[in-house]
Image (spheres, rainbow, N blue to C red):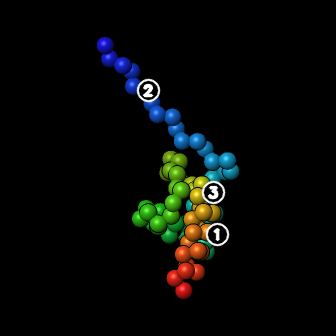
Amino acid sequence: MSRARVPAAPPPLPARPLITADALATMLSTTRGAIYARHARGGIPGGIRLGRSLRFDPDIIAAWLAQSATSGEQSR
């Protein structure tokens, strides 16, 4: 007797709308291409692929920016 495999539940959606790569590029004063490249290298957390586009969870981005700011202050 074989058991049917039950698919895992998808992760919960963020409470706020996702940020586009263009919007994140504007926030960080850079280009969309730089956002895609940095995310591909693992430099930006919270990226979610939706088809061919890349979106970001605003809560994860806010925490990442806060952590980056704190790390920068400590290294000065």
Q: Residue furthest front?
A: 74
Residue 36 in sight here:
no
Q: For the residues carrying marks 3 and 1, which lies nearer the camera in this image?
A: 3
Q: CA distance from mark 2 to mark 3?
A: 30 Å
Crowding near pointer 1: few (<14 within 10 Å), some, many (20+)?
A: few
Q: Say what secondary structure mark 1 lies in.
A: helix
Sequence order check, earlier mark of 2 and 3: 2
Q: Residue at x 63, y 57 (%)?
A: 59
Report the disc number at residue 6.
2
Report the disc number at residue 27.
1
Sequence order check, earlier mark of 2 and 1: 2
Q: Residue at x 41, y 65 (%)?
A: 41
Q: Where residue 47 appears, x then y in whole percent?
A: 52, 56
Crowding near pointer 2: few (<14 within 10 Å), some, many (20+)?
A: few
Q: Residue at x 54, y 42 (%)?
A: 11
Amino acid carrying label 2: it is Val
Q: Residue at x 55, y 80 (%)?
A: 74
Q: Say what secondary structure mark 2 lies in.
A: loop
| The image quarter in which residue 64 lies | bottom right
Q: Where residue 3 appears, x then y in whole percent?
A: 36, 19
Query: Which of 5 and 33 lies nearest the eye of the viewer?
Result: 5
Residue contact at pointers 3 and 1, CB within 8 angstroms? no
Q: Where residue 43 appears, x then y in whole percent?
A: 47, 66
Amino acid carrying label 1: it is Met
